[in-house]
Structure formats: C-alpha cells, structure tokens
Image: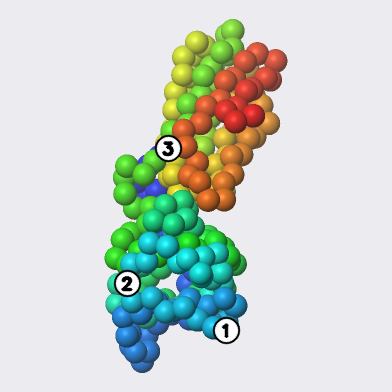
Amino acid sequence: MNRNLLLTLVLAGCDAMPEGDIGSESQALDGTVTLYPMAGYSGTPRTLTGTTDDLADFDNKTVSLKNNTGGIITLWSKANHTGRCQLVFPGMWIPNLAVSEMGPYRLSSVEFGRQCGLQGVDLSELTVYNETTLSLVRFRVDPDNLTGSWSDSVDPGVSSHQTFPKNAWTVRVKTQWNIWGWQQACSDHTWTTDDEIIANQWVVVEDDNTCYYSGS
C-alpha cells in the first residue's frame, strides 16, 4: 500500500469533524476529556484527566464526548489500549460516535497523546496464492471501502501479498485473472471486525472461478 493511501485511511478512520463541533479558541481547554452516555453531550458524564486503562463502570457506554485538551487522544474499543482505535484531535467534540469509526457503546479505554494508526508497523498482510494451471492473476485490497491498487501479475504457482492497516474495520479483496484480458476470477470477499484487529489473511485462486479464503 502506498504512503498516500495509508494517510488517507488514517484520516478517514479518525475524522469525526464533519458532524461535530470543533473546539476553538473561544472554548476553554481545561485538560479534560468528558464522556457522555447519550448523544448531544447528554446524561451523567464521566470526566477523565489522563490516560485511562479501563473505563470500568463506564465501559461500552460512551455515545458522545468532548476533548477539551490541547493534544490528541486515542479511543480504544478494549481495555488497556487494545482493539480498534480512533484518533480525536485537540479541542474536538463529537456529538454522536455513531458517525465516527469507533461507533457508540464501544469505548473501553482512552489514551492521552498517542497517535492512532499512524505507526508504519501497524500493518497486516493479505497473501494471494495463484494455484491456477495457466492463468495470470492479480488482486486488489480495499480497506474500509477505500480503493486500493491492483497488484502486479502473479504467475501460476506463485504467491504475492499486499498490506493493509490493522486498524481497518473491513478489508475487501478483489481478484482477476487474465483470459484474453483481465476478468473477475471470483466473487469479492470481505473480512470484518468489531473489536479485534484483522490479522494476516490469505486467498487461494484455482481454476474454474474457485477461490478459498482464510476464515471461511
């Protein structure tokens, strides 16, 4: 995956700004993050003053939040800063997590100051094995409904791979083979997740439009 696509994925997965109220200089930044159990900053809130490993009694209850800090925070869907993550920018308010990648009723821990999904090592790998008799094969990985790039041609008996962010919620693979021009080899396949990362996956392409997928 090229660097520009990875950056696009990070921004797409962490950007709740179109639906939220962005903190401005007129809003006092008091260094806290406030979580609410209802949309629109309603209900009895939970206020955080620093990194919280486990929200405990507020686990999986957050629907809206205010980041009144001068720095980024990272939302995590599991305790101890694991699972899915979403970056929230300084001063950003999100009136409903339903419009964000995290989603409502998923938040389990919060980390002050760490960037979500920007680490180059946070990648999984999709490997495609061309087990056809004579056909060239190529494939494309589309994380979170973003369009990836077609791989180079893969010879019969050879495998190839592409990477995708572990923070992706969905990963779709498209396969084609070259029979008098590129044609779809098998139906598209999509891996999805809720809390766990999407780890390394594989696809086997055989003759007669037959494909086998990891986890199927």
> Is residue 62 or residue 175 the one in the foreground?
62
Q: Earlier in the sequence, mark 1 or mark 3?
A: 1
Which residue lies at the image location 34% right of the left edge and 53% below the top edge? 118
Q: Position of residue 30 (x, y in %)?
A: 32, 85
Query: Disc 1 and disc 3: Cα gap in Å?
Result: 38 Å
Q: Which residue is mark 1?
A: 42
Do residues under tags 1 and 2 come within 8 Å of each other at their CB atoms?
no
Q: Is residue 12 above or below residue 196?
A: below
Q: Position of residue 94 (x, y in %)?
A: 50, 75
Q: Earlier in the sequence, mark 3 or mark 2?
A: 2
Q: Position of residue 64 (x, y in %)?
A: 53, 75
Asked whether residue 99 is in view, the answer is: no
In the image as oriented, which residue stretches furthest toward the top? 133
**Within 10 angstroms of label 3, few (less than 14), some, or many (20 or more) residues?**
some
Query: Disc 3 and disc 2: Cα gap in Å?
Result: 30 Å
Residue mark closest to the camera, 1 vs 3: 1
Residue mark closest to the camera, 1 vs 2: 2
Q: Earlier in the sequence, mark 1 or mark 2?
A: 1
Query: In the image, what residue type sits under mark 1?
Result: Ser
Query: In the image, what residue type sits under mark 3?
Result: Ser
